[in-house]
Every structure is written in structure tokens, then in C-alpha cells.
Amino acid sequence: MKTIKILHYIFITVGLIALLSMGAWGYKTYQFIDTAHSAQGTVINLIQSRSTSSSSTSNSYVYRPEVSFQTLTGDEIIFQSSTGSNPPAYKKGESVSILYEPENPQDAKINDTLSLWFSPIILGIIGLIFSAFGIGISIYLSKKEKLKNYLLRHGSPITAKIDSIAENTSIRVNGRYPFQVISQWQDPTNNTLHIFKSENIWFNPSPHINQDTVTVFVDQSNPKKYFVDLSFLPRISE
């Protein structure tokens, strides 16, 4: 549970940082557009560079347009776009709209969505994904805690026989699998066998279990809702 909480905080923190960065970058871009001068430029070259997000295949390169334009004062400026694509978004000799700050024309940008808003969009996507995961984990933990408290107050306690202690191989954190106490109980009213799995335990509980049975709190209306009481196990020091 502690590991899941840590992941929850990591996802929320990264998501918030990305969203705040998106907001700051977006506002900076908005200010740039609001104060920039416009000009017409010409694509004079396509600069090939390796993409950092792909392997060495035919599509592992992107092409960034190199553009020439003149400022209002007549200075000729040549700059390379910060964004690229494959296939190229522009052709050599193509006329493009330019935005630039008079005091810093070398940092000019092509007046299109990709060049102006690429970074804020990417940060926004990352922020939304991480925040969604973080919120999802938060909802999961909240529901799990509410169910646990409900079962401890209103669930029917039964004595289940400990069957085994096994690693939960569906979860892996830092190369480690958590343990689960597996127990079983046969309902005498209908001769149905129920298997119960405990919450994940991030240490081997075997040396600390000196009993053959464990108490399980079960929802009478839905036996699939249960809580295995392992309060007798030691707690990991913080």
C-alpha cells in the first residue's frame, strides 16, 4: 500500500509540474504572438537531424526548415525552426509567415501551430496523462480504504485456513514482487469453497506467521468483497 501511495504522489507531482509548465510556456507564447512583428520568409534549406524518439530506421530523421527573412530595418536573418517532421512540413523555396521580436530576431518562429504551440501541447498531454493516473490511483486507494473500514465494522468475521504465502507476480516494483497470504474457507451452508487473497505485503511474512488460520471479514451480500485481517504482522519501519 505504501508503494502505491508513493506512485500516486509521483504521478500527481509530475502531472502538476507538467501542467504548470504548460501554462507558463503557453502564456509566454501568447505574449510572444501579441508583441511580435510579422514578416514573410522563404525556406532556403531543410536540415536533417536524427529524431530522439525513434530507432535507426528510414523514419528516424526529421527535417527542420531553415528560413531567411528581412526585418523591418532591412536586416537579413537566417534561422532554423525548433521543430521538425518527417515527411518535411515545408519545401525549399516555399514562402512562410514569420513572427519575431525586433530586439531578438534570431529567435524568430514560423507562424504555424506546430512551431508555436508544440511544447505547450506536449507538456499538456504529459500533464493530463500523469494527473489522470494519479487521480485514478487516488480514487482506487480511497475506495479500497472505505471498503476496508466498512468490512471491519459491518462484515462477518470468518476463520479461514491459511493455504500458502505466495509472491504476487502481477506487480513488480524495483525488481521486487509483493507477498500475499492465500487462505480458503468452505461455506457450510452451500458447500462452496472461497479463496481469499490478502493485500500486498512488501516483506516476507512467513517467519512472522505462527498460526494456521486467519480472520477474514466478508460482506454477507457479496462474498467477493472481503478483507483479510493481517494486523498481527509487524509493520515496516518508516
Image (cartoon, rainbow, N blue to C red):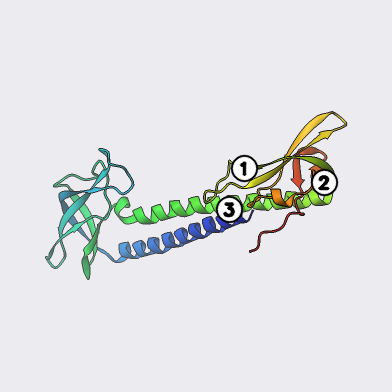
According to the picture, the residue beneath numbered tag 1 turns out to be 168
Q: Earlier along the polypeptide chain: callout 3 or callout 2?
A: 3
Mark whose residue sits in front, 2 or 1: 1
Which of 23 and 175 lies nearest the eye of the viewer? 175
Which of 197 and 63 lies nearest the eye of the viewer? 197
Q: How far across and how far down the image is residue 90, in percent?
A: 21, 45
Label 2 element class: loop
State the residue at coordinates (44%, 51%). 125
Which of 152 and 68 lies nearest the eye of the viewer? 152
Q: Amino acid at mark 1?
A: Asn
Mark 3 nearby-residue class (10 Å; few <14, some 14–19, many ≥20): some
Would you say 1 lies left or right of 176 here? right
Would you say 144 lies left or right of 219 here? left
Q: Which mark is residue 135?
A: 3
Would you say 172 lies left or right of 76 here? right
Q: Amino acid at mark 2?
A: Gly
Q: Tell me if residue 170 comes above or below residue 208 in the rendering.
A: above
Label 1 element class: loop
| Residue at far right of view | 189
According to the picture, the residue beneath numbered tag 2 turns out to be 155
Q: Amino acid at mark 3?
A: Ile
